[in-house]
Image: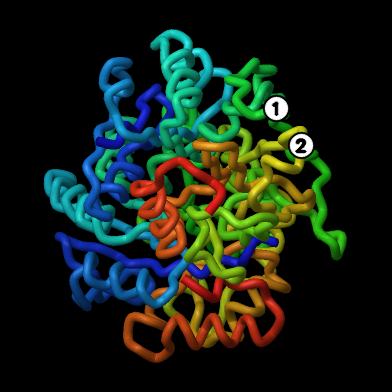
Amino acid sequence: MLSKRIIVCLDVRDGKTTKGIQFKDNVDIGDPVEMARLYYETGVDEIVFYDITASYEKREIMIDVVRRVAETIFIPFSVGGGIRNVEDMRAVLLAGAEKISVNSAAVRDPSLISKGAEAFGSQCIVLGMDVKHVGPRPGIPSGYEIVINGGRTDMGMDALEWAREAERLGAGEICLNAIDADGTRDGYELRLTALISENVGIPVIASGGAGKPEHLYDVLTKGKADAALIASMVHYGTYTLGQIKAYLANRGLKIRQTW
Amino acid sequence: MIAIIDYDAGNLTSVARAVSHLGFRCAVTNDVEAIRRSERIIFPGVGAAGSAMASLRRLGLDRCLAEAFAQGKPILGICVGTQVVLEYSEENATSCLGFIPGTVKAFPGDLKDAAGQRLKIPHMGWNRIHRVRPHPLLADIRETDEFYFVHGYYPQPRAPEWVVGRTEYGVTFASVMGMRNLFATQFHPEKSGRPGLSILRRFCRWDGKADR
């Protein structure tokens, strides 16, 4: 059987890994290539890099990071942040990434998903969704709304409808980030994750709120997620990947345990 | 020199990077003469079987590969490269190379695991291979090792003698096949960490004989 994937997320700004809480107050915490190497050697199943560099002109710095990561680790990794068009996607894939994650740009122009899937295959295209709980209301029947710009702009779009639409357009995977849980370390948004995962046919990566190994267990079982994204849990040495994987395996989940 | 066959079928840079990382010389090429001169061939691929076969035929690589296979040159198929060595693929109803008798099947739409849970398609992520026969390229692989897969179709060789390893995902399928100098994996060894690199390393030194 397929293993549940543990994915580490690195936010990268101007070529350095950084970490903020609810998209604010970022501090640099290390070199992304060296951090990727460490996580690769300690058994991470996949890595996600988000380029949060403010300036579009500095994108070349990120491409260089991607190239160096691709020469260092031999597992899949994806790159998101600042992808605006098919040419941006191509640059990242040629530099060695396995997948590209699109978020705000796909909300503004959904055809970006279909164009990317057509050019590179659905397996390359991850839809990143930032979602906020607002309660059911007209236009938002699921009670979960899509937000962009780090949660500052409400889009008036229903999260479940957007997930289904993205699948129809050719997205190969969804990375679902619950804004309300992000950075809290109080656990993933289980209800939202299960809602999306049970209603699409593509894998769902849960993101936002991981603080303890049992949070991963919960989202991979009750939350029906195919993969769990973590960041600060491991960046600050609170847990090692080995500890998290051993915990999940001991509770009966199928986890990749040798590498 | 190792020729990595370039037939417009996706991300070939990752295979070349992995081979170079292991210290072997390789070239990504669709040049028939360069492929003829190569010591061994890696035949990767992502994308659809239909467009893969169309590209191979257009570039004359179908005949070139058949010649290399007949000569005993070591060949490693990966993912779609593995699927098209069979005779026929249900994907785009494609007639394929036919080195190994058998077909490529679509995962059924209502795929479920042993506990009755719905399984998503494609089969994407890490899974194990259960060896059904020894093969020199798998000499370092442990039963617990996992490999990275991403595919919606799976190989089904007609005779069990061509199956080297099997993987389970709702159905049990041949994830590793071997026939003489041809070795073919449905998973991506270049994206499967240490166990995947060990298969690539052994392939880069392999003499094409399966019986050791």
Along the line of sight, the residue nearer the viewer: A180 or A112? A112
On the same chain, marks 1 and 2? The answer is yes
Query: Which residue is painted at 34% across and 45% down in the image?
Result: B14
Percent position of residue A127, x then y: 49, 47
Query: Which residue is painted at 68% across and 69% down in the image?
Result: A223
Q: The disc numbered 1 marks a residue on which chain?
A: B
Gap between marks 1 and 2, in whole Å?
A: 7 Å
Residue type, numbered disc 1 = Pro
The residue that disc 2 covers is B159
Percent position of residue A126, x then y: 48, 47
Q: Residues within 10 Å of mark 1 (few under 14, many from 20)?
A: some
The residue that disc 1 covers is B101
Q: Residues within 10 Å of mark 2 (few under 14, many from 20)?
A: few
Query: Which element type, helix, strand or loop, lies under badge 2?
Result: loop
Q: For the residues labelled 1 and 2, say whether their Cβ atoms are less than 8 Å apart.
A: yes
Task: Answer left or right for A68 relative to A222.
Answer: left
Query: Which residue is painted at 40% across and 43% down in the image?
Result: B207
Residue A110 appears anywhere in the view: no
Q: The disc numbered 2 marks a residue on which chain?
A: B
Residue type, numbered disc 2 = Ala
